[in-house]
Amino acid sequence: MANGDRWERWGVSYTTREGRPVLSEESIWQLELLHPEAVERTPEGALYLHLDQTYLVTAIPGRAFRALVPAERPRRVAPR
C-alpha cells in the first residue's frame, strides 16, 4: 500500500460515495478476471467481494457503480 489505498493489491481504488465504498461494474469484472478468489457469486444471485473485508455488492438505481456493504460471510477460498 505505497499510496495508502487499501485495495491496491487487487488493482482497484478504494472510493466512497456518501460514506459507502463503491466500485464500478468494470472494476468488478476486472476483479473477477484477475482475482477470482476475491469474487463470490452465490447460487441465489448475491455477489460478495472479499477484499480488505467481506462486502455484499448492492445496486444503486440510476448509477454506474455499485455500493459495497460490509457483510459477515466467511471467505470461500483462502486469499493469495
Image: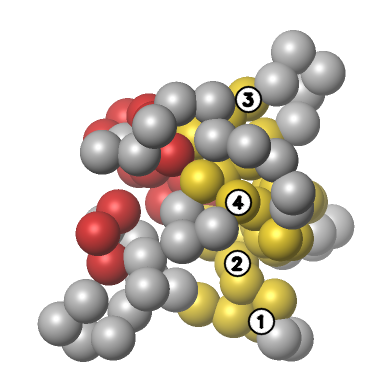
Look at mark 1 in the image and give the residue it sits on.
17
Q: In which quarter of the image is residue 75?
A: top right
Q: Mark 4 points at which residue?
A: 54
Give the number of callouts.
Answer: 4
Which residue is found at the position 51% from the left and 46% from the top?
Answer: 50
- Gap in angstroms between the C-alphas marked 3 and 2: 17 Å
Q: Compared to 4, does 28 lie above or below?
A: above
> For the point 59% across and 80% down, which residue is it?
16
Say what amino acid the circle numbered 2 marks.
Val
Is the residue marked by circle 4 packed among few (<14), some (14-19), or many (20+) residues within 10 Å? many
Residue 41 is tagged as 3
**Could you tell me residue 28's position as x and y percent?**
48, 45
Q: Is mark 3 on a helix, strand or loop?
A: strand
Q: What residue type is labelled 4?
A: Thr
User: Which numbered disc, 3 or 2, marks the residue closer to the eye?
Assistant: 3
- Is residue 29 something that shows in the picture? no
Q: Which tag, 1 or 2, sits closer to the chain's start?
A: 1
| Mark 1 and mark 2 residues within 8 Å of each other at the beta carbon | yes
Q: Distance between the residues labelled 1 and 3?
A: 24 Å
Mark 1 and mark 3 lie on one chain; the one further toward the N terminus is: 1
